[in-house]
Amino acid sequence: MTVLQIVALVAVAAGGGAVALATDPLRQTLLLGVFGLALVFLFFAFQAPDVALSEIVVGTIGLPLIILAALRKISEQERTRQRDEDRP
Amino acid sequence: MSFLPYAVAVWLFIVGLYGVVSSRHMVRTILSLAVVQSATYVLLLAIGYRSGGQAPIVADIPPTTTLVDPVVQVLVLTDVVIEATVTALLLALVVQAHKRFGSVDPNDLRPLRD
Amino acid sequence: MVIRPLSRRWLNDAVTGAGAVAVVVLCALLLSRAAQHPIAYWMGGFRPVDQVAIGISLSIDPVGAGLATFSAVLVLAALAYSLRYFDSVDGVFHALLLLFGAAMAGFTLTGDLFNLIVFFELMGAAAYALTGYLIEDRAPIQGAINFAVTNSIAGYAMLVGVALLYARTGALNMAQIGLALDRHGADPLVVVAMVLLFLGFLTKAAAVPLHFWLADAYAVAPIPVCVLFAGVMTELGVYAVARLYWVIFAGPMHPHMEAVRAILIAIGVVTALLGSLMCFQQRHIKRLLAFSSVAHIGVLICGVGLLSARALAGVGVYIVGHGLTKAALFMCAGVLLHRFRTIDEYDLHGRGREIPAVGVLMVVGGLLLAALPPFTLFAGKSLLEEASTQAGYGWLIAVFIVTSAATGAAVLRVAGRVFLGWGPRDAPGAGQARAGQVSEDEMQDRPDHTPPMMIVVPVVLLALTLAVALIPGAVPAIEDAAARFTDHAAYAQWVLRGRPVSWPSVAPSHISAVDVLYSSLSVLGAVTLAGLGLFGRPLRARVPRVVGGPWLRALHTVRDLHSGHIGDYIAWWTAGASLLGAICLLTLA
Amino acid sequence: MSRRARLWLFGVAGPGLAAVLVIGFRGLPAFGHYHGVYGLVVNGVELSMRHATDYVTALNFDLRAFDTLGEEYILFASVLGVTLLLRVMREEDEEFSAAGRGLDGSSDAVRLLALVLVPLLVALGVYIVLHGALTPGGGFQGGLVLAAAPAALILAGRYLELKILAPSWAMESAEGIGAAGYALLGLGGLIFASVYFRNFLPAGNPGQLLSAGFMPLNSIAVGLEVMGAFLIVWTAFLDQALLIRRRSLEAR
């Protein structure tokens, strides 16, 4: 096993743990991006460029756009609800 | 040391499940689910790896080179697509859940307690 | 995104209907050919080289083709039923229903382990969206989320199992994996792979304690979708367990057959009893039918667990009988929902008098669930009983009778209260989940007019359960198919070598007086229990505190476990997984 | 169950499952010493038959093309599901202001960057799709990059322009044509070579663009579908985030 692979594995383990254990969803989304990059690194280290390319496109554009849009919608609804409640 | 990739796969599977179980925000549940799934990527690719192997692309390498197993990579490719689609579906459900329940805490998503 | 006018609706219906009919015809043709010789079809023409499969095969035997036909018939029935049911989203519902049907067909026909999981996920993707279809209400969203999260985790567990088997055998074709494992025997890796794969499919089949998602999802999915979920999707989980056992694990597990049998039957018995208990307690009719499915799935898991050809034939017949009956019952619930905008048993008290036809259907359905002779479910149950006696598990018969009686009684009780106005109008105490009013979105039709298709389709389905049992040769054909299904060595032969295998005909079993006695017990039990449920409240008050108190507390505890909290469900899933894993590792490896 | 009970249950069950997995994984071949027969056979078969140089794509679009069919339909089903679940409901309004809402605070520099990015992404996407059988990548990866090109406009702060540049009928057609096209290419095998998903085009010379039989066509079909699919999903979510508003309480 090469040093590169060990480093990548440790990064993936740490990243995955961080994503699953973080509690704030926005921070979690950012961590998911970092975790995705660690996975890309690992896939290259495991000689899987096709998979790495897939993970790059899914992890950097495919999913974050959806997650951020969903979080934005949720936070905006929270604001609207607050406003409605504040109104007498 | 040669057990490390497999240990990482176990860790990801269990820590992802813990994320789902302890979650108080549905978005966290969904992202933890993605962590569970990444366990399968690591496991599959680790199984198919061969020491000193090259990526299974033979454009300009001599034909006798050791190649890593291409089959597991195809399985992971399919897996990545499944992850993206399931995540999108679940997030759509969560957006709607927030409209209906006014909350994304699994504690509050209990319609039958009305 | 924008809702289009209804004028294109007939086109959608026509195209979808034609497609569904075509699938039924094609599957039936496939079945008639596979009944003579099983078919191995290699996608892309990549035939195996020296018994090494490099492509994906459809390995079509009569059991697979039969289930594909059965699911196609139910897709057609669901479409016919929903002709006048929805009108909000143009085409999407139809497309998803057809994709769901395609996934079920692929799932039953494929011979490749990874391909099986691809179709599992396709079935899931279509099913999650269909479950959450009614986004105007709260419950469908929550049900769909729980369904999607639980089933996704099940899918990942299976993928780990596939990875283990691939590492061991270098194969993805099921026949080839089985052949390779024959040479290795059972070691911890094989056992863990089996545990993970079974876990995945038992989650789909809703075995206790992996079943929590099911009631949440079935209680809220639109009726035509419930018809498919309860009629065939859950049963496909049981099918997959049987398929994997006989094709892949029968070789290495052969020395431990007794232990595997005991483990599967234990799961089945717990599932059947808990499902029956929960079923009888519900007042939300769809939830009641959902738990009734859990109970009957328990019986089916016992059947698979008996690990014999006869039991498997019983499972096949039972699946047909139960699927058709349960589909018809969900359709009856749909009529109530359509007309009265609620499916709460107490809210509907006596209101069903306007539609006696549905009441008759419901009573018939209840009696069929209680295994009334000579319908299909009874034929299946008789085979299962014979097989359990042969395997030395004669006491299972009692479990089967209790399950039939309890689930039949629940339906009869509902029919009595709703259509005849029997029993008290007010519910006993709080605690039971009351079904809320549905929003207007599910159906826009005039509620005072029930479209005829909503009655005709369940009548046809119930008639089919009689027909299947009475057509001479139908049940013996299933027995033949089951015998071939359990032939581990022959499967590898015809898939990998393309050699025709000939099997001798199985001596058909006969229905004896004992079978009729058992099922009259269950029918009688169902009627008695239903009567107790309707009129037994004064009696219940007389039960001494010492007995009644703990029993009620236990009931409430069990009920509270079904909390709707996804974290709870996954915690239980993990507990089930580790328990099954530990037991299997201790006894099988 | 209370949160504490839930965590206790998992605290026992989680390590238990981990132990079960570890016991199973101990039977795996040591890392780097895998000698499965499937991959070796594939490596032998594929170059000689189809002249594809990327074996992963070859497996994806030829040997295990049926899996990819299932995968494409999973994508298709989820896109249907997302549009179904995020449909505009009765109590909701769509805001169509003339300027269009983008992400707040995107500066001119970001906008310029995004506009430069668009043609680059298109070129890259087309390249990845077409070279699927030769170099890493293929229909899925290229299709997603192609979808990202119009999406980059959001960075430029003009969400409504995305809807003009990639109108819903175009996205839906791209997705539908791609998905149906892939299934039809399989059918082409049935018609021209009498087996579903049988290659029916000549293999060509290894390394050339038009080689590897019908794989480039499969790759294009998948690329189209993936591009359409992701654009539809993104638009559905961004509609929710940027356009759709719940009517105020008084209006209901």
Image: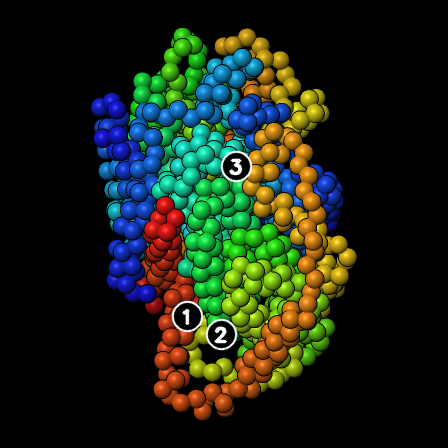
x and y percentages locating residue C193 in the rendered image: 41, 42
Instruction: Residue at 50%, 65% (x, y): give it.
Output: C272
Q: Residue at x 45, y 64 (%)?
A: C270
Q: Between D223 and B66, which is closer to the camera in this rendering?
A: B66
Quadrant of the rendered structure where residue C453 is?
bottom right
Q: Nearer the viewer, mark 1 or mark 3?
A: 3
Q: Earlier in the sequence, mark 3 or mark 2?
A: 3
Q: Disc 1 marks which residue? A: C559
> Mark on residue C145?
none
Give the residue drawn at x 40%, y 37%.
C164
- Identify the mark at residue C174; answer none if there is no mark: 3
Label 1, label 2: how far apart the Cα atoms are: 9 Å
Residue C252: quarter of image = top left
Circle 2: residue type: Gln
Residue D214 image position (x, y, % from top left): 59, 19
Residue D124: x %, y % from top left: 44, 20
Specify the amino acid type for callout 1. Answer: Arg
Crowding near pointer 1: few (<14 within 10 Å), some, many (20+)?
some
Q: Residues within 10 Å of mark 3 (few under 14, many from 20)?
A: many
User: What SS does tag 3 mark?
Assistant: helix
Q: What residue sits right under mark 2 in the picture?
A: C281
Against C442, residue D53 (above or below) is above
Identity of the residue drawn at 71% across and 51% down: C477
